[in-house]
């Protein structure tokens, strides 16, 4: 399914940000009580597998949260995200985009629309990762190969 292939590419771009997280900063946050780098990564991993993939398979959400009990330390957090994606993709490929699933909010929605909302969710949190990276002095990756400044320099007008 084209949408699922697209999501796989979205995840590749997210992973380019994840691998830039300094391992010693995995538990960093800008404010007490807000997501850490690790929380964001665990959240993306867990919600993909245990909410979006379960709902797309016409099953209820089993989202476990984003706590350190899921994966602790940089290497384990990245491995968890990779593993959850690998488990999710066959479920998405087997899903019927025209079928109706029930979201955790109790809303009936087509599986195709549900998967599109997953992509929006991923991109939202990738933006947070980019902001966090900037806040700790790490240059986020260019999303499509060029920075804004490079696009401007190559543009006419």
Image (cartoon, helix red, strand yellow):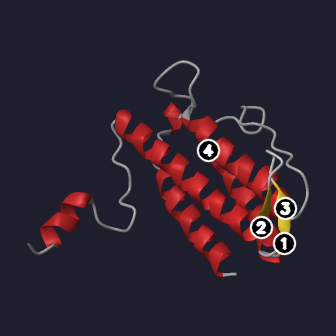
Distance between the alpha carbons at the discs numbered 1 and 4:
29 Å
Q: Are marks 2 and 3 in contact (CB under 8 Å)?
A: yes
Q: Is residue 30 above or below residue 70?
A: above
Q: Are marks 1 and 2 in contact (CB under 8 Å)?
A: yes
Residue 8 on image: x %, y %: 62, 69
Q: Is residue 136 above or below residue 16?
A: above
Drawn side of residue 19 relative to residue 85, left or right: left
Mark identifier at residue 110:
2
Residue 138 on image: x %, y %: 36, 42
Label 4 sits on a secondary structure element that is helix
Q: Which residue is at 69% across, 35% downward? A: 72
Identify the image quadrant of the C terminus.
bottom left
Crowd around label 2: few <14 · some 14–19 · many ≥20 (10 Å): some
Q: Which residue is at 53% across, 55% downward? A: 123
Distance between the alpha carbons at the discs numbered 2 and 3:
6 Å
User: Outermost residue, right direction?
Assistant: 59
Q: Are marks 3 and 1 in contact (CB under 8 Å)?
A: yes
Q: Nearer the viewer, residue 101 or 74?
A: 101
Distance between the alpha carbons at the discs numbered 1 and 2:
6 Å
Distance between the alpha carbons at the discs numbered 4 and 3:
25 Å
Which mark sits nearer the N-terminus, 1 or 4? 4
Q: Which residue is at 19% across, 59% downward? A: 149
**Which residue is disc 1 drawn over?**
99
Q: Are marks 1 and 4 in contact (CB under 8 Å)?
A: no
**Which residue is disc 4 drawn over?**
41
Mark identifier at residue 101:
3
For the residues carrying marks 1 and 4, which lies nearer the camera in this image?
1
Label 2 sits on a secondary structure element that is strand
Determine which quarter of the picture holds residue 84: bottom right
Q: Which residue is at 85% across, 49% downward? A: 61
Drawn side of residue 122 relative to residue 102, left or right: left
């Amino acid at each position: 399914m084209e949408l699922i292939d697209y999501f796989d590419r979205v995840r590749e771009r997210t992973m380019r940000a994840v691998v830039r997280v300094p391992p010693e900063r995995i538990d960093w946050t800008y404010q007490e009580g807000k997501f850490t780098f690790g929380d964001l990564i665990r959240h993306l991993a867990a919600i993909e597998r245990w909410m979006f993939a379960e709902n797309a398979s016409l099953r209820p959400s089993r989202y476990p949260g984003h706590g350190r009990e899921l994966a602790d330390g940089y290497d384990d957090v990245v491995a968890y995200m990779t593993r959850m994606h690998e488990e999710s993709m066959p479920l998405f490929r087997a899903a019927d985009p025209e079928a109706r699933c029930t979201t955790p909010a109790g809303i009936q929605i087509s599986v195709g629309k549900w998967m599109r909302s997953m992509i929006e969710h991923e991109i939202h949190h990738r933006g947070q990762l980019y902001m966090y990276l900037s806040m700790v002095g790490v240059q986020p990756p260019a999303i499509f190969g060029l920075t804004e400044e490079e696009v401007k320099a190559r543009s006419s007008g």
